[in-house]
Image (cartoon, helix red, strand yellow):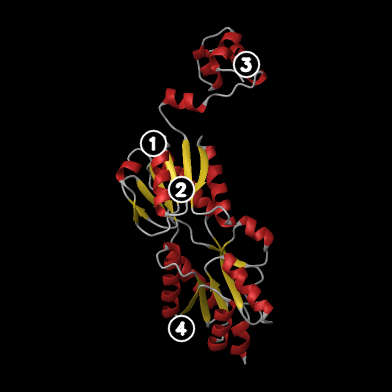
Amino acid sequence: MISSLELARICGVSQGTVDRALHNRKGISDATRGKILETASKYGYCPHPAAREIITGKNMTVSAILPAINSVFIMDLMGEIKKKLVEKGYRLIFTTFENTNEMLELLADFSARRNCASIIMPQEENLTIPEHLSTDMKIISLFNPAKGKNVFFLSPDEKKTGHDAVDYLFKTGHRKIIHLTYPRENFYAVRMRMNGYFAEMKKKNLNGITVAGLTEKKLLDMIKKEKPDALFCHNDWLALSAIRILEKNKIPVPEDISVLGIDNSPTFIELCPDITTMEYPHSWIASSLAALIYSEKKVPQAPSFRIIERKTVNSKIWSKSEKN
């Protein structure tokens, strides 16, 4: 690998001419440009990112501080985000944190390194980011809102997601719909989906019931008592866990109980292709995040979660009984 100065010496031109050739700028002949590009390829020339940032005054590094990387949903989402950022010339780096203090320490480190932006996934709602961490670095919070100068929250309408899930199951004939979720009251997406579920159940004059923290005993006790015809699960992993419990106990899905998940993560669906689900807007999140980093323009309204019908929701449960 050679430097731009060495590349200029080999080609017998100035560094400015090398820069014009590498960035397709005017001011040099096609022959000179071709010679420089051919020589750069021959010697494996690669521009030094730190030097480029010093010259341009613009850092193109985006950091992502994640609570875990063992979730295929998060992995797939970050893959989509990386693709959109690369299209705009940014590079994305990942790290993880155990608690809020560690996340703030990492933000301080990335701010000191003059990263242009950081993506965070806080463990609590409405975390206030100290101003000195975000003055010169945009911070985009996913899943849980955060507050502060130059801090943005990016999320689809999670309450509407709960509404739409109940509405879909109702239209397919279900009336006894139980919501399976997580015991995380300080987690925005969990709380808002649950609120949307209860609001839509009330609107349809149905009895809303949630089971937070799924166990086999909890689920079987609830089924025995409430006799549900559908389970609306916070995500596809929870849906899969419920289906495994039901099948283990000889309760057929969807003949006796329909199961609806959320996410439609590409990696998960490759492993479990049969779950009927609501597709999380991965592409919208990625495009909107890239737009926020690139400029401060308002992002477009989030699309509704698209229903992906597969094999775990039975649309004939109530229609048969009503005919009788």
Look at the picture and state if 80 lies above or below 323. Answer: above
Numbered mark located on residue 112 in the image: 1
**Amino acid carrying mark 3 in the image:** Gly
Q: Earlier in the sequence, mark 1 or mark 3?
A: 3
Q: Residue at x 31, y 47 (%)?
A: 130
Distance from disc 2 to disc 1, alpha carbons, whole Å, reads 25 Å
Q: Quadrant of residue 9?
A: top right
**Amino acid carrying mark 2 in the image:** Ser
How many circles with numbers are drawn on the protein? 4
Quadrant that contains the N terminus = top right
Distance from disc 4 to disc 3, alpha carbons, whole Å, reads 72 Å
Q: Nearer the viewer, residue 219 or 80?
A: 219
Numbered mark located on residue 288 in the image: 2
Q: Nearer the viewer, residue 244 or 312?
A: 244
Which residue matches tag 3? 34
**Amino acid carrying mark 4 in the image:** Asn
Q: Is residue 173 visible?
A: no
Look at the picture and state if 280 lies above or below 90. Answer: below
Distance from disc 2 to disc 3, alpha carbons, whole Å, reads 37 Å
Question: Seen in the image, is 94 located left or right of residue 311?
Answer: left
Are the residues tagged 2 and 1 within 8 Å (C-beta)?
no
Question: Seen in the image, is 83 located left or right of residue 38?
Answer: left
Which residue matches tag 4? 207
**Amino acid carrying mark 1 in the image:** Ala
